[in-house]
Image: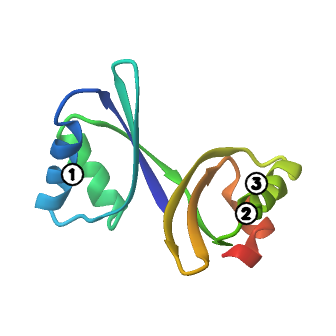
């Protein structure tokens, strides 16, 4: 799976414009996280069509980076996310970004962007 990282100047209406552009071309947002740092906005997206979504946003003048990401299923109880993070840490896999995608019943789905997806996937195969 790919995650899109959108870098933009923070402004009123940024999220409205970005989501409208994707929606107009039938690209669904599957997961989103957004933050600002000073006058900059950083938006993490997983969309239904990564290639098309990237092209749409770049045509609109956004800076878009694409990177590998993985979804991890974790039992939704205290300490479970810590086990996943510790497993990666002990194996020297750096977590670049994590997002809670959804919780359903007793399962939480997290999206991880790490510096070594292949190694992380092997370590976390029981969580996939």
Nearest to viewer (mark 2 / mark 3): 2
Q: Is residue 77 above or below residue 13?
A: below
Residue that mark 2 sits on: 78
Whether label 3 touches label 1, CB < 8 Å? no
Q: Is residue 110 above or below residue 64?
A: below
Q: How far apart are marks 2 and 3 (CA)?
A: 13 Å
The disc placed on residue 85 is: 3
Q: SS for tag 2?
A: loop
Label 2 Cα neighbours within 10 Å, binned few <14 / some 14-19 / many ≥20: few
Nearest to viewer (mark 1 / mark 2): 2
Quadrant of the drawing holding the C terminus: bottom right
Q: Distance between the residues labelled 1 and 2?
A: 34 Å
Residue at x 26% of width, y 65% of height:
28
Q: Is residue 32 left or right of residue 95?
A: left
Residue that mark 1 sits on: 19
Extreme-top residue of the structure = 38
Residue 91 image point, x, y percent? 86, 52
Label 1 Cα neighbours within 10 Å, binned few <14 / some 14-19 / many ≥20: some
Residue at x 75% of width, y 65% of height:
80
Q: SS for tag 3?
A: helix
């Amino acid at each position: 799976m790919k995650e899109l990282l959108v870098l933009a100047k923070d402004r009123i209406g940024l999220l409205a414009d970005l989501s409208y552009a994707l929606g107009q071309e039938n690209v669904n947002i599957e997961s989103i996280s957004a933050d600002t740092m000073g006058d900059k906005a950083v938006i993490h997206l997983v969309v239904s069509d990564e290639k098309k979504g990237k092209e749409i946003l770049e045509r609109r003048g956004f800076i878009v980076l694409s990177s590998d990401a993985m979804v991890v299923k974790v039992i939704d109880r205290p300490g479970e996310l810590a086990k996943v993070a510790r497993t990666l840490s002990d194996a020297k896999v750096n977590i670049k970004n994590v997002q809670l995608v959804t919780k359903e019943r007793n399962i939480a789905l997290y999206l991880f962007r790490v510096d070594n997806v292949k190694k992380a996937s092997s370590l976390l195969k029981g969580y996939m």
